C-alpha cells in the first residue's frame, strides 16, 4: 500500500516539476483518447504540440499563438490575485464580455470620426466595464457576505444574454442589412487594433499582456499589496493582524480580475474578433482559470501556461482539419490537464512512501 | 397582451417539470455538502448525465437503461472528483471547476453524433379516471415517473439525514471530520459515498433535461442548471424540504419568462432569459445577508481537506 507523509516544508523543486508532469500525463491520456476515437495518437499529439510551431503551415499558425495567448494570459493574471487570497472569481468570461460591450459601445458612439483618442478611450472604457461587472460580486460579498463564486458565475449568463441583446439591438450595424452584429472595427482605421509587426501576430493587447506580466511580478513580489495577498491566502487571521482589511482585499482582487478581463475583451473586439456578435466570447474566461492554476498563480508561470494553452487551441484546430478530431476533444484535453495538475499537486506537500509494516 | 391564455393548471404542471432536474441535483449536492465536501462540478456531472442518458436511450431504445446510464455516468465523474479531493487532497473549489470544464467537454465530445435526434418517449403515469380528474389529475397524477421518484428522493434524504444513524454519522463527518475520525468513523469512505450519491442525482437530473424536459440533445443544454442547484442548497440553508421550495421558485421563474416570451411581451427575449440568473443572485443575497443565521446550518467542515495523520 502507498502512504502519504506530509513534508515539513512544501518542496520547491516539485512546485516547478509538477506542471510539466501534468502536461506529460495529459499528453499520454490525450493520446489514449485519440486512440479511442480511432486516430493515430502519436500523429495527433504531434499535430497539436509540434506542427503549430514548426509544421508546414507554421507561417500562419505561429502568429496565432500570440493572438490566442494574450487574452488567456491577461485574464489569468487578473484571476491569480484573487486565487492567491482564496477569492474565487470564476466569472471572468462575463467580465470579458462586458469589457467588449463597454469599450465597443463607447467607440461606436464616435463613429465614423478618425480621432486618435478614440482607441485609448475605448480601451479605458473596456477595463472600466470589466471592473464594474466584477464589482457586483465584490460588493455583494463585502456588504451581504454573498458567495462570490456563484454570483460571478451567474453574471456570465447575464452578460451572455446582454451580449445577444446588444448585437441584435442597440449596437447592431445600421448598414448591416439586418444581420446581427455590430459594425466591424477592423474596417475603421483609427480603432483597428492591427498587428504591429507583420508576421508576429502581436497587437496592442499582446504588448499589454506581456507588460502586465512584468507589472504583476513586481506587485506580487516587491509590493506590500502582494504581501497582503500572500498572507490572506495562507491565513485569514494572520492577515488581520498584519492590518489587511478583508473587504478591501475582495474589492481589489475582483477589481483587478475584472479590469484585466475587460481589457482582454476590448483588445479582442477591436482586433481579432472585429465586431460585437452573439458568438463573440469563446470561453477564454474559463480556460484562463486552467491557465492560472497551471502557471502556479505566478506571473511568469502564467505566461508560459498561456502560451501552452494557446498552442492546444491552435493545434486542436489543425487536428480538426487534418484528422477530423472533434472540436470538443480539445476542451476535454484542457479539462484533463487541470485534473492531472491538481492530482500531481500532492507531491508538493506530501511524500509518497511504500507502507511498511506498522511498528509499535 | 392576453394573460387569459395562461392556464394555471398547465403552468403548474410545466413548473414541476422545470423544477425536477434542479431539485434532483440540489438534493444530491445537499448530501455532499452535509458530509463536508463542496463539489462545484454539479454542472459538469449534469451535462454528462444528460448525454449518457440520451445516448444510451437512443442506442438501446430503452429510456430506463438511459436513466441508469445517466446515474452511472454522473457517479463515475463524481468519483474522479472524489479521488482527487479525498485521496490526493486537492483543493475542492479548483477540482470542482475542473470537473465542470471536463464534463462539458466530454459531453460535447460524446454528443456530437446525437444532435437533432428525438429520444424514445418517456412513459407517464396514467391511472384510469384519477389521472383524468380536473386540476388535481394533471398536477398530481399524470407526470412522468421521475417526478415521483424525485419526491421519493426528497423524502428519503430528509428522513436519512434527520432520523437515521447513517445520517447522523454523515452530519458528524461534515461538522468535524477530526472528531468523527477520533470516534472511529471512516471519514473518507463516508464522503466518497456522499459524493457518489451527489453524482448519481446530478446525472439523473441531467438526463431529465435531455430525455424529458426538452427532449433533445444540444451542446451546453443544461445552461447553468447545475450552478443554480448549488445556489438552491444555500437558499435552502442545507435543509432538504426547503430544496423543494427553492426548486419550485426557480422552476416558476423559468416557466414565467418562457410564457412571457410566448405571449410576445414587449421585452427582448435576451432580457427575459436573464431572469432566472438574476433571481438566483437576489435570493443568494437575501439568504446570506444575515450572516449569523446563514451559517447556522452550514456544515462546519465544508470544503476542508481531511488527512488522517496517523
Image (cartoon, rainbow, N blue to C red):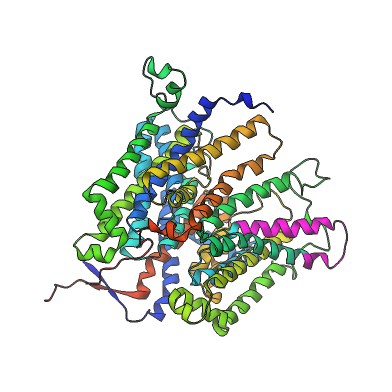
Q: Which quadrant: the N terminus of chain A? A: bottom left
For residue A41, what is the image quadrant?
bottom left
The image shows residue B8 at horizontal and vertical percentages of 54, 26
Q: Which quadrant: the C terminus of chain A? A: bottom left
Q: Would residue B170 be visible to someone looking at this image?
A: yes
Q: Is residue B262 above or below residue B281?
A: above
Taking depth in this image into account, of A261 and A60 the one nearest to the observer is: A261
Identify the magenta region: A94-121
Residue at the extreme bottom: A222
Residue at the extreme left: A360
The image shows residue B69 at horizontal and vertical percentages of 36, 40
The image shows residue A172 at horizontal and vertical percentages of 77, 47
Q: Is residue B66 located in the magenta-colored stretch of the structure?
A: no
Taking depth in this image into account, of A136 and A178 the one nearest to the observer is: A136
The image shows residue A273 at horizontal and vertical percentages of 70, 56
Q: Would residue A44 be visible to someone looking at this image?
A: no
Q: Is residue B173 above or below residue A164?
A: below
For residue A271, what is the image quadrant?
bottom right
Amino acid at each position: 500500500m502507498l502512504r502519504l507523509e506530509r513534508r515539513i516544508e512544501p518542496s520547491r523543486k516539485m512546485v516547478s516539476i509538477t506542471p510539466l508532469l501534468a502536461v506529460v500525463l495529459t499528453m499520454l491520456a490525450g493520446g489514449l483518447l485519440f486512440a479511442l476515437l480511432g486516430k493515430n495518437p502519436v500523429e495527433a499529439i504531434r499535430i497539436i504540440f509540434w506542427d503549430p510551431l514548426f509544421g508546414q503551415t507554421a507561417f500562419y499558425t505561429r502568429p496565432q499563438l500570440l493572438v490566442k495567448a494574450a487574452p488567456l494570459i491577461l485574464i489569468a493574471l487578473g484571476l491569480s490575485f484573487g486565487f492567491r487570497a482564496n477569492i474565487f472569481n470564476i466569472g471572468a468570461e462575463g467580465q470579458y464580455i462586458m469589457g467588449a460591450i463597454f469599450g465597443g459601445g463607447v467607440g461606436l458612439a464616435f463613429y465614423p470620426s478618425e480621432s486618435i483618442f478614440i482607441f485609448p478611450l475605448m480601451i479605458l472604457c473596456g477595463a472600466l466595464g470589466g471592473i464594474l461587472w466584477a464589482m457586483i460580486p465584490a460588493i455583494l460579498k463585502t456588504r451581504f457576505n454573498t458567495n462570490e463564486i456563484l454570483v460571478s458565475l451567474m453574471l456570465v449568463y447575464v452578460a451572455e444574454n446582454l451580449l445577444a441583446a446588444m448585437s441584435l439591438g442597440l449596437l447592431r450595424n445600421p448598414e448591416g442589412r439586418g444581420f446581427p452584429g455590430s459594425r466591424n472595427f477592423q474596417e475603421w482605421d483609427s480603432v483597428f487594433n492591427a498587428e504591429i509587426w507583420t508576421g508576429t501576430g502581436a497587437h496592442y493587447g499582446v504588448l499589454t499582456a506581456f507588460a502586465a506580466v512584468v507589472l504583476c511580478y513586481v506587485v506580487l513580489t516587491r509590493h506590500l499589496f502582494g504581501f497582503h495577498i500572500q498572507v490572506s491566502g495562507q491565513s485569514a487571521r494572520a492577515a488581520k493582524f498584519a492590518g489587511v482589511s478583508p473587504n478591501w482585499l475582495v474589492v481589489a482582487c475582483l477589481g483587478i480580475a475584472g479590469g484585466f478581463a475587460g481589457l482582454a475583451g476590448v483588445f479582442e473586439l477591436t482586433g481579432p474578433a472585429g465586431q460585437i456578435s452573439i458568438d463573440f466570447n469563446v470561453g477564454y474566461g474559463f480556460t484562463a482559470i486552467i491557465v492560472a492554476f497551471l502557471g502556479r498563480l505566478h506571473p511568469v508561470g502564467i505566461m508560459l501556461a498561456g502560451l501552452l494553452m494557446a498552442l492546444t487551441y491552435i493545434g486542436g484546430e489543425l487536428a480538426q482539419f487534418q484528422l477530423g478530431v472533434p472540436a470538443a476533444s480539445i476542451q476535454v484535453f484542457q479539462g484533463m490537464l487541470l485534473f492531472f495538475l491538481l492530482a500531481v499537486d500532492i507531491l508538493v506537500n506530501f511524500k509518497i512512501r511504500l507502507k511498511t509494516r506498522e511498528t509499535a | 397582451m392576453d394573460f387569459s391564455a395562461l392556464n394555471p393548471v398547465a403552468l403548474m404542471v410545466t413548473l414541476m417539470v422545470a423544477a425536477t432536474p434542479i431539485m434532483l441535483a440540489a438534493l444530491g449536492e445537499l448530501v455532499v455538502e452535509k458530509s463536508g465536501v463542496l463539489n462545484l462540478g454539479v454542472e459538469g456531472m449534469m451535462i454528462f448525465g444528460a448525454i449518457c442518458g440520451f445516448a444510451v436511450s437512443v442506442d438501446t431504445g430503452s429510456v430506463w437503461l438511459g436513466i441508469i446510464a445517466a446515474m452511472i455516468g454522473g457517479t463515475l465523474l463524481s468519483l474522479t472528483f472524489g479521488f482527487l479531493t479525498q485521496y490526493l487532497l486537492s483543493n475542492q473549489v479548483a477540482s470542482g471547476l475542473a470537473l465542470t470544464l471536463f464534463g462539458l467537454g466530454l459531453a460535447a465530445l460524446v454528443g456530437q453524433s446525437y444532435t437533432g435526434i428525438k429520444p424514445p418517449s418517456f412513459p407517464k403515469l396514467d391511472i384510469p379516471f384519477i389521472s383524468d380528474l380536473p386540476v388535481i389529475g394533471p398536477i398530481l397524477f399524470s407526470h412522468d415517473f421521475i417526478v415521483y421518484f424525485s419526491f421519493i428522493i426528497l423524502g428519503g434524504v430528509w428522513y436519512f439525514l434527520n432520523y437515521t444513524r447513517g445520517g447522523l454519522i454523515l452530519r458528524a463527518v461534515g461538522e468535524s471530520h477530526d472528531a468523527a475520525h477520533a470516534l472511529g468513523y471512516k471519514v473518507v469512505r463516508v464522503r466518497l459515498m456522499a459524493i457518489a450519491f451527489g453524482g448519481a442525482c446530478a446525472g439523473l437530473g441531467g438526463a431529465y433535461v435531455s430525455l424529458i424536459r426538452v427532449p433533445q440533445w444540444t451542446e451546453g443544454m443544461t445552461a447553468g442548471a447545475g450552478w443554480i442547484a448549488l445556489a438552491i442548497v444555500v437558499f435552502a440553508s442545507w435543509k432538504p424540504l426547503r430544496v423543494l421550495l427553492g426548486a419550485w421558485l426557480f422552476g416558476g421563474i423559468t416557466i414565467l419568462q418562457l410564457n412571457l416570451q410566448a405571449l410576445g411581451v414587449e421585452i427582448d427575449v435576451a432580457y427575459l432569459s436573464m431572469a432566472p440568473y438574476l433571481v438566483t443572485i437576489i435570493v443568494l443575497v437575501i439568504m446570506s445577508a444575515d450572516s449569523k443565521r446563514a451559517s447556522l446550518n452550514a456544515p462546519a467542515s465544508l470544503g476542508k481537506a481531511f488527512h488522517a495523520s496517523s
